[in-house]
Image (tube, rainbow, N blue to C red):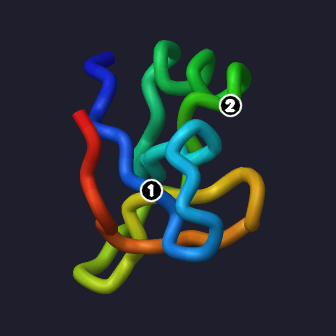
Amino acid sequence: MRKPKVSSCPECGKTNVVVPILYGYPSDEAMEAAERDEIVLAGCMDGDLDPSYYCRRCLVAFENARQFA
C-alpha cells in the first residue's frame, strides 16, 4: 500500500496524527495498517462528500487541507 501525502488537521494543524480514511472492502494489508493506526477503515460505501482524512488527536474527520510531501 502506497503512503499518501499527509494532510494537516484543520483543528490542531498537526500532520503526525492525521491518517487517511479508507472506504471499501479492506484487503488484509489494509486491515493490518488499520491495526497499526496508519489508516481508518470507514465502510464499504463512500460518497462525494465523505471525508478523506482523520485526526487521531482531535477526533475530527475532514477533507483535504494543506498537503505536505
Residue 37, numbered circle: 2
Q: How many marks?
A: 2
The mark that comes first in sequence, 1 or 2, is 1
Q: 2 or 69: which is nearer to us?
A: 69
| Quadrant in the rendering for residue 37 | top right
Looking at the rendered structure, the secondary structure element under dot 1 is: loop
Establish if 19 lies above or below 36. below
Say left or right for 41 vs 48: right
Whether the residues at callouts 1 and 2 have beta carbons within 8 Å, the answer is: no
| Quadrant in the rendering for residue 17 | top right
Say left or right for 2 vs 21: left
Q: Amino acid at mark 2?
A: Asp
Q: x%, y% of residue 51?
A: 41, 71
> Which residue is denoted by mark 1 in the rendering?
8
Mark in front: 1 vs 2:
1
Residue 60, numbered circle: none
Q: x%, y% of residue 63?
A: 36, 72
Q: Amino acid at mark 1?
A: Ser
Q: 65 or 20: which is nearer to us?
A: 65
Looking at the rendered structure, the secondary structure element under dot 2 is: loop
Q: Residue at x 32, y 17 (%)?
A: 1
Q: Residue at x 37, y 52 (%)?
A: 7
Label 1 – label 2 distance at C-alpha? 16 Å
Establish if 69 lies above or below 6. above
Establish if 10 lies above or below 42. below
Establish if 15 lies above or below 26. below
